[in-house]
Amino acid sequence: MMNKLTWILKWTGNMQCDPTKALRNWKQASLSIWGWGGLGVVLFLITFGPFAIFYLAFYILCFIGGGFVVLLLFGKINSEKHLERCEHSYLPSTQPAILKVLEEMKSESKPIKIDRRLTGSSIIDEPLQQVIQFALRDYIQYWYYTLSDDETFLLEIRQTVQNALVEFSTRSKEVDWQPYFTTRLVDDFATHLRVFRKAQERLNEREDPKQRDAPDELLDSFFEAEVEMERKICRDVVCTSRKDEEGYLRDLCEVLLYLLLPPGDFHNKNMRYFLREVLARGVLLPLINQLSDPDYINQFIIWMIRDSSCNYEAFLNILKLTDKVAELEAVKDKVLEELQYLRSLDTGADDINFIKNQINSLLFVKKVCETRIQRLQSGKEVDALKLAANFGKLCVIPLEHILVHNIALQFFMDYMQPMGGQAILFFWLTVEGYRVTAQQQLEVLQSSQRDGKRQSSQTTKGLLRAAALGIYDQYLSEKASPRVEVDEGSVTRLAQKLNKEDPTPEIFDEIQKKVYDMMLRDERFYPSFKQHPLYVRMLAELDMLKEPSFRGSEDGDGESFNGSPTGSINLSLDDLSSGSVDESAQLHAFISDTADAFLNQLPVAGVCNDHGKTYALYTITVIRKNSDGSEDIWKTYRRYSDFHDFHMRITEQFESLGPILKLPGKKTFNNMDREFLEKRKKDLNAYLQLLLNPEMVKACPVLIPYVYDFLENKAYSKGKGDFARKVPPLIAKSDIDPEHCRVSAQLDDNVDDNIPLRVMLLLMDEVFDLKERNQWLRRNIKNLLQQLIKATYGDTINRKIVDHVDYMTSPEQVSDYVKRFRDSYWPNGILAETPPRRDKSLRMRTRVAAKTTLLGIMPDELKHIIGAETTRKGILRVFDMFQHQPLNRRLACVFLEGFLETLFPQYKFPELFVKLHSRSPRVLRYSQKLRSLHKR
């Protein structure tokens, strides 16, 4: 250090002495510094590489950053210690009593007592408690225990759920479920089917086949038809949008929680929102998803009718009628798999023939599938009816068989109307009805005379003469329009017989035979009918549109047919005719002395029981004033069914009386109640007084014989029959287009009895589209249902329905439902896994199997009544309706809404549903359309 200092001093001293020399020395020193520095840098780079400088800079930065981190941590720790010392220095210490209370509160558990009674029935409560326990375990506990170990929340949830179930059970016991199951449920389904049928009809009217087959077009047509029927409701948004469906279910669940939960639980928002989400997204939404799945519905159909044997003919019909290539491909693949298996078997001599038959059958099915696939893919699909009409040899059905078969007669009527032959056809049918009625009346008269009973023969003969004269005036007199054109000699002879002789059942035989010959031989009628498309459609309905061979004479006598893939068919009256002769000819008025009848108040004679059937009997006191001033007084006894039959008879004969006379309605259940009987008695009195009003008698004098016959002191002879009396026409008279209203709107308000049966008729009307059929067909449908119901239930159908509904809602059955639900969702107490979605081929085969099963269970009697083709179309229409998941979701919503309206009748659920569904754009467009129409 001293040497350096000395050198500097010397150097500065030299500078002061000699500036030039000092500058030269400084330059030499600087040069030596840069030289040594550069040399050092070069040596550094040679030694450590060119990137060493970056590493050096990085090390320096890390050193500096580490120093800052150490300072920060050191300062943080010291600051915390300082603050803690300050806190204890300035705040008072906690009292020991408070610490002890806190410890006791943590250690003390608050027991919540839960009443395990839910419905009041132990056999229901036990499995229901297990369902609640499983649901809490698998849907709440698994995530709640990751947040807290406190059991209080879980107990509160359980208590709230049980309170809701108790309230639900209480309300369910107060509801009469018979009207819901027998009327509302069937009406909802039938109305849904009506909307679907209208949507199909609209699609079929479109010319573009691509639009007809598009699923979106069907949905649009369906919901357009729904809004036209409901007017203020359309469920398209709820059924097609997952987000809107969840919102709809949340709204419903919140209303349900308001009705079922105690006020304290409902106003707890956290609890309410939690339960709402669990109920909406954890219960209702998965349930609707499953019930609306077409594959699940198809499996359920097969399971429901699993006991019925598979119909091979129905299976082939399904393959020939299907328009889904995927179904045919799936069946074909399965056939090929079975063929490969059978051909691989090592068989002996005994079963070789059996296996060969199986292989031949499978090869035939394979051929059917390939042929159908080729037609569908080539676009050369043809109408079987047109093909048969143009190229096939048709079966020939004799005219005599057509006239007595309801299906064939329907098509013949449709043909005769534009040909101008409907009058002669109706004349023939009316005469047949007269013959049957006359024979029955005369047999009753002869039987009464043999038994010694007094019955006026003049009355019966007068009725027959009135009926015969009515037929003559309607069809044969000069005033008849249209008039049956036969030779005047026959008409004159008939008129003389009617004036001079007592009418017999055979009085019209001569003219009737000539009318029959006219229909048979006139080229305008039966001969041309055999060449008409309606004839081909008739054969299709009779299931006779096959490849026949023809034999027979050309004039129509001795005609027959045969032809079938499996053999010959010989047509006979027994084979073709399944219905009775039409009884359209009604006995009209009979001539009697003019008499005025007065009635006092009707007392109820009593409640009678006849072979287990209970009914009320009414006593009518009649006072008749004769022309000579004398009076006749008698009492007669009538049931309500007699009143109803009488009302139907006179309103059919005199249509103008329909809007005036209102018969008091029946009551399906509890119709023996004393208050109800008293009210009915007053209404029946008012009905009779209006009927016998002098102004009414003056306006309709021909009504008097009917009234007199009803009030006579004798057993009343029902003209309509029990079944016809109970069942009104399938389509009721209404000012509203029935196609734009619910199915139940067509029920007659004046007739409330046997509503389940009449709703069943309306359901059949929608399934098989029978509205355009004539009354002959409808009458035979009623007869068929009468036979089926009598064979199943006898005459106590309403009692059977009540008993069946009571059985379905009994504690034992409800317990069984809960157990099945528990075992289905938690087999062996473990939550069932979501089954994987089945592959497309399996789903398509399930579709074919479901259609085959549905078509196979249809009874032959039904096919004979409404036709084989109509039956097939109706069954396939119902099946097709279930193959669209959005439509199934709509049906599930409708069922849910109907259930809630029945469970809570005192609340305004219908208005709530209008508000929920009126947000649909279709409702807004329809409302605007109506307003624009009203402005015009």
Image: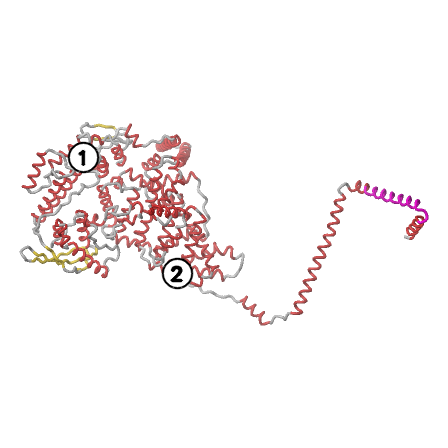
| In front of the other: 469 or 368 | 469
Q: Is residue 161 above or below residue 516?
A: below
Residue depicted at x 24% and y 30%: 531
Horizontal side of residue 782 vs 26, given as left or right: left
Residue in the image at 22% along x and 55% along y: 664
Q: Is residue 165 visible?
A: yes
Number of numbered discs: 2
The quadrant where residue 85 appears: bottom right
Which of marks 1 and 2 precedes in the sequence?
Answer: 2
- Packing grade of label 2 (10 A; few <14, some 14-19, many >=20) is some
Where, quadrant-wise, is the C terminus in this rendering? Answer: top left
- The image position of residue 815, as x and y in percent, is 37, 56
Q: Secondary structure at mark 2?
A: helix
Q: Where residue 789 appears, x then y in whole percent?
A: 25, 48
Q: Is residue 881 above or below residue 525?
A: below
Tell me how far mark 2 sits from mark 1, CA to CA: 67 Å
Farthest-out residue, right: 17
Q: Which residue is at the front of the view, 651 or 711?
A: 651
Q: Is residue 349 visible?
A: no
Identify residue type, mark 1. Glu
Instruction: State the residue position of label 2.
Output: 166
Q: Which structural element holds mark 1?
A: helix
Callout 2, which amino acid?
A: Val
The segment highlighted magenta reads 16-41
Give the image quarter of residue 694.
Answer: bottom left
Q: Nearer the viewer, residue 318 or 460?
A: 460
Q: Residues within 10 Å of mark 1 (few under 14, many from 20)?
A: few
**Tag 1 residue:** 400
Residue 250 drawn at (x, y percent):
44, 54
Q: Kindly give the residue lying farthest to the front in the view shown.
A: 936
- The majority secondary structure of the magenta stretch comes to helix
